[in-house]
Image (tube, grey):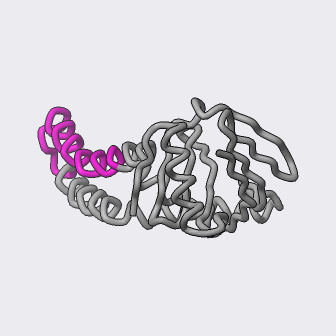
Amino acid sequence: MNFRFNVKLSDKDFLEFNYFHMLKSHYGRKTYILLKTLLLVLPLVFWFAGYAIHSFSEDYPKMLIVLIPLCLILFFTAKPIMKASVKQQLNTWMKKGKKPYSTEAVMEFSDESIVETTSENHTELKYSAIDSVYVVKGEIVYLYINAGQAYMLPYASFENEKQFNNFIEFISKKTKPVKYSE
């Protein structure tokens, strides 16, 4: 079975991919959980280190009074800060006149390989190069090649729901099992 899609991506698609990548993909989620764990553990590390070094000098409790609330604030605002960071990075690229993604592409899926053609390049890869596949909210498909790169297929690229379902069935047979996410 062969599939051919005319893919059109927007800044919103790019931002949503990066948000998903940071917070829900198996790549980004590990980093996000590690960050939040560090923010909770950091005050304890400083407390033990301070005790060992200073035996709780006069200034030490004052430092903890500042450090603990700061870590808690960062813990609870990590997600919005990360999202703002991605948005800011996209704005920086836009000011330089270069988007970090192709706004239009043709993606072809044959029995042997995937071919992506954009105005700037032509890429062919075997299905074994696909590391993971996510369907997010039934609105977009992410075909991860590695920890930082994925092909995006918005639902609008499909002619109808039947073609979408046929594609998901097809890609499930060619790659690792498809993961579904909200």
Quadrant into which the C terminus falls: bottom left
**Image vertical order of residue 78 relative to residue 116, above or below:** below
What residue appears at the point 64 percent right and 59 percent down from the top-left corner? 89
Rendered location of residue 25, percent (x, y): 43, 49
Q: Which residues are magenta?
A: 33-59
27 left or right of 5?
Answer: left
Residue 47 painted magenta: yes
Residue 157 painted magenta: no
What residue appears at the point 52 percent right and 67 percent down from the top-left corner? 139
Q: Residue furthest right?
A: 119
Where is residue 166, by image quadrant?
bottom right
- Prevailing SS of the magenta stretch: helix
Where is residue 24, by image quadrant?
bottom left
155 left or right of 45?
Answer: right
What residue appears at the point 25 percent right and 63 percent down from the top-left corner? 69
Q: Nearer the viewer, residue 120 or 50?
A: 120
Quadrant into which the N terminus falls: top right
Q: Nearer the viewer, residue 41 or 1?
A: 1
Q: Nearer the viewer, residue 88 or 102?
A: 102
Rendered location of residue 40, percent (x, y): 24, 51
Rendered location of residue 137, percent (x, y): 45, 66
Where is residue 63, by image quadrant?
bottom left
What residue appears at the point 27 percent right and 61 percent down from the top-left corner? 72
Q: Nearer the viewer, residue 54 or 108?
A: 108
